Image (tube, grey):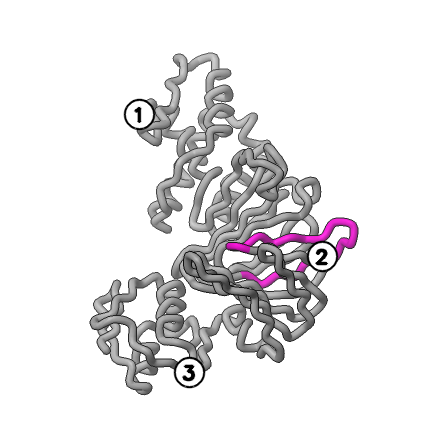
């Protein structure tokens, strides 16, 4: 990789259009990059930061130490000032401005792709010291697809995050999902694929399935398109067949809620988000407004509590908010919108 390629990678990185191999090549290039080249990459990232309004992130301790060592090797520079972790960034040394910007590229972007060391016990389901990457689609973002090193393909919905190991095979093909994703998993009988979600784990041999498991929802749903998956929650497990869905209702304290097996699920309805649509079929109004909030990055408020009503309708993600509110009005669901907040009137 040369500087031109590195600059192109940063642009692809921010758009989420890159592969793990491209990311690894970029990290390798950074090891030999000059201070001038680090500065150019920093300028590139700064321009993207302003364009996309990227969130502030904290660099990983691993890359902080590596870049400190990397910059200390520059003979013409004064000794490097160490990052103040409590303050979150660094002293305003011009060299560190460049270095920190590169760290920001490494640890965050419009789609967050974090390269960090996570040390957890085997009982938590992760190998000790495994390196993990994170791919995210933010609230208001459009669904995105990418491929893992084993050839498996994943589509992520808005407000969703997938964490996966850098060494996918070595870590047992275990990924972690918060949000909604559609999986096309490459089969490997010797190493089943695993998806961890809130309160459960999904075991896969090679198949197509959808998982909806947002942290702010009271249930998760795993829907099988073809092949076979097993959903495990506590001491329970359900083996799904195509067209079946396993629903986990997260219990209130002291209340036991077993998994539910739902047959004859409408796959087109479940996967409507993947085609860029928002489809609802007699869904509770709260569920409808949650989906609108994620897809359009708006806040939802209720003037007099959450109504008991339900809604049926289909929206294109290309529709603007006002078009959606007009459809809600046709079903006697009245809302006010001020540009940032939708208020459900009654």
Mark 3 or 2 closer to N-term?
2
In the foreground, 161 or 322: 161
Instruction: Classify residue 110 as left or right of residue 329.
Output: right
Residue tagged 2? 186
Whether residue 208 is in magenta: the answer is: no
In the foreground, 203 or 97: 203
Name the quadrant containing residue 327: bottom left
Residue 297, horizontal then vertical, whole percent: 35, 61
The residue located at (70%, 50%) in the rendering is: 150
The residue located at (31%, 25%) in the rendering is: 92
Quadrant placement of the C terminus? bottom left
The residue located at (43%, 71%) in the rendering is: 317
Task: Name the secondary structure under disc 1.
Answer: loop
Residue 269, horizontal then vertical, whole percent: 53, 77
Q: Which mark is residue 109?
A: none
Residue tagged 1? 92
- In this view, the mark in front (2 or 1): 2
Residue tagged 3? 312
Residue range highlighted in magenta: 181-199
């Amino acid at each position: 990789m040369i500087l031109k390629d590195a600059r192109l990678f940063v642009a692809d990185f921010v758009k989420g259009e890159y592969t793990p191999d491209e990311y690894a090549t970029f990290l390798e290039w950074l090891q030999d990059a000059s201070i001038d080249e680090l500065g150019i990459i920093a300028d590139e990232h700064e321009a993207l930061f302003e364009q996309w309004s990227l969130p502030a992130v904290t660099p990983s301790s691993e890359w902080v130490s590596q870049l400190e060592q990397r910059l200390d090797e520059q003979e013409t520079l004064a000794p490097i000032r160490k990052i103040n972790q409590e303050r979150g960034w660094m002293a305003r040394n011009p060299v560190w401005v460049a270095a920190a910007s590169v760290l920001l590229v490494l640890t965050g972007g419009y789609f967050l792709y974090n390269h960090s060391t996570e040390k957890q016990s085997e009982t938590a389901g992760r190998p000790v010291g495994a390196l993990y990457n994170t791919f995210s689609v933010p609230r208001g973002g459009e669904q995105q697809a990418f491929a893992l090193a084993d050839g498996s393909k994943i589509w992520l919905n808005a407000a969703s995050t997938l964490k996966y190991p850098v060494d996918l095979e070595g870590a047992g093909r275990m990924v972690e999902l918060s949000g909604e994703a559609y999986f096309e998993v490459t089969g490997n009988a010797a190493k089943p694929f695993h998806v961890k979600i809130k309160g459960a784990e999904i075991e896969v041999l090679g198949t197509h399935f959808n998982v909806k498991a947002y942290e702010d929802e009271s249930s998760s749903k795993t829907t099988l398109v073809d092949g076979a998956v097993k959903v495990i929650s506590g001491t329970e497990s359900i083996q799904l067949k195509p067209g079946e869905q396993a629903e986990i209702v997260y219990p209130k304290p002291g209340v036991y809620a077993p998994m539910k097996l739902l047959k004859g699920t409408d796959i087109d309805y479940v996967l409507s988000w993947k085609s860029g649509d928002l489809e609802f079929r007699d869904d509770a109004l709260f569920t409808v407004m949650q989906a609108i909030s994620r897809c359009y990055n708006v806040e939802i408020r209720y003037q007099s509590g959450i109504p008991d009503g339900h809604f049926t309708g289909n929206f294109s993600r290309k529709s603007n908010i006002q078009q959606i509110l007009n459809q809600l009005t046709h079903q006697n669901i009245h809302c006010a919108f001020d540009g940032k907040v939708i208020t459900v009137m009654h």
